[in-house]
Image (spheres, helix red, strand yellow):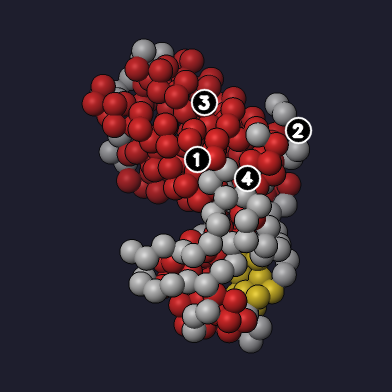
Amino acid sequence: MVSIDHDRKAGGSHIAAIKAGSLREQVTRALEAALVAGELQPGEIYSAPALGERFNVSATPVREAMLDLVKEGFVAVVRNRGFRVVEMSEADLDQISQIRLLLEVPTVAQVATSISPGALDAMTPMADAIEQAAAHGDLIAYLDSDRMFHVELTSTLANPRLTDLVDRLRRQTRLFGLNDLIQSGRLVASAREHHELLSLLRAGDAQAASELMRRHINHTRGLWAGRDE
């Protein structure tokens, strides 16, 4: 796969030309990077042809990529105009956080009583990658590694519907506020909690693992709002 030709770190430009290869996936990742960096603003409407010119590709892969983002709830179709970047309200973030607490806290408790040492060993490099990406300000690598970690964690319960639901909820908010967290350095501290969680799971401490997940979700919600909790 040919990589996107742009600086992926916070502060760099994420609207840049796509070289070649799997354009739909490449454009999708470039659009996600632009959303994270705030280069595509909530409430603004963007047309596929205009974005295609900025990416130096035709409008078709941009339109396909935007439709992928529609399914994820990041953008909405505006008839005859293009795509509007969805604004995530405080109420939206509160509701998603509440659902995550109801799902992920008991899920982690269940995982703590059943996960194998081999599965924990396999997740350790994922936790390393999350922390390294946060330290280097590589938002896309952070998002990819974080998603892989939590999908792998939930999938140990062999309930694909639960795994998909948790993943969808996390993806709805995964682009929110990360650039500010990188700039402040607070994302690194949040990233370290993944290693702490693995240690608790290895010890089989379901109560402590559940409390950590609850704290992690509440802490993340507080960071989104610009306050530490």
Q: Residue furthest bottom?
A: 80
Which element carries disc 1, helix, strand or loop?
helix
User: Disc number at residue 178?
Assistant: 4
Which element carries disc 4, helix, strand or loop?
helix
Which quadrant of the view contains residue 129? top left
Q: Amino acid at mark 2?
A: Arg
Q: Amino acid at mark 3?
A: Glu
> Dot 1, how many residues are within 10 Å of its Cα: few (below 14), some (14-19), or many (20+)?
many
Q: Amino acid at mark 1?
A: Ala
Mark 1 or 3, nearer chain start? 1
> Dot 4, how many residues are within 10 Å of its Cα: few (below 14), some (14-19), or many (20+)?
many
Q: CA distance from mark 1 to mark 4?
A: 12 Å
Mark 3 or 4, nearer chain start? 4
Mark 2 and mark 1 in contact (Cβ < 8 Å)? no
6 sits to left or right of 159: right
Mark 1 or 4, nearer chain start? 1
Q: Amino acid at mark 4?
A: Leu
User: Disc number at residue 193?
Assistant: 3
Q: Can you see residue 165?
A: no
Give the percent coordinates (x, y) of residue 134: 54, 38
Q: Which residue appears at 42% of the width and 32% of the height? A: 127
> Dot 2, how many residues are within 10 Å of its Cα: few (below 14), some (14-19), or many (20+)?
few
Q: Return the residue at label 2.
A: 227
